[in-house]
Image: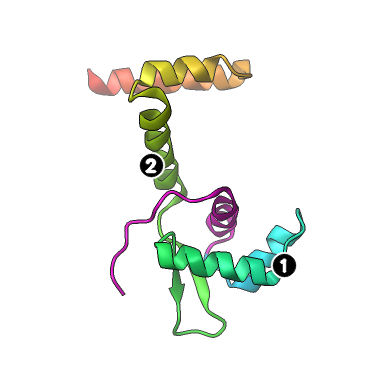
Amino acid sequence: MPNKEPRRPTDGELEILRVLWQHGPSTVREVHEILAADKRTTYNTTLKLMQIMNEKGTVTRDESRRPQVYRASLPEERMQQRLVSDLLHRAFGGSARKLVAALTATDISEEELAEIRQLLDELEEEEQ
């Protein structure tokens, strides 16, 4: 099977990826049961979406087992980095300052703001 670079996932694909990141490698039935607890969806919809994700390279499928087990192709943090990078370039013209300005204009708790400041301070210390 060729090594595919995963494409940007859709909202539905992100829901499945969250299940896989949280619960680890899973069968379609396991993923479907978790998704169906929060929203109406059919098993066939979950199956088809996971098959498409496998074709796109967003997940991998272990075909040596029955039922087949799926796993996310990228760790959650890596996918988040790719999504933020894509957003940064598409919506903010590559400007991190504009991205942060937009972020801080939204509802952000004092606790989250303090955590962001701490992250920036740590980044600054690493650069020195």
Point 31% across, 75% down: residue: 1
- Is residue 121 visible to us here? no
Q: Position of residue 29 (x, y in %)?
A: 66, 72
The residue identified by callout 2 is 82
**Residue in front for this viewpoint, 119 or 90:** 90
128 vs 43, left or right, is left
Residue at the image point whose x is 39% and y is 53% from the top: 7
Q: Is residue 92 above or below residue 105?
A: below
Is 90 or 32 nearer to us in this picture?
90
Q: Tell me which corner region of the image, top left, top right, bottom left or bottom right, holds residue 42.
A: bottom right
Q: In this rendered view, identify the residue nearer to me: 102 or 81.
A: 102
In the rendering, which numbered label is found on residue 84?
none
Q: Residue furthest left?
A: 128
Q: Residue at x 59, y 53 (%)?
A: 12
Locate residue 30, reporting x and y percent: 65, 69
Q: Amino acid at mark 2?
A: Arg
Per the rendering, the mark at residue 42 is 1
What segment carries the magenta color? 1-24
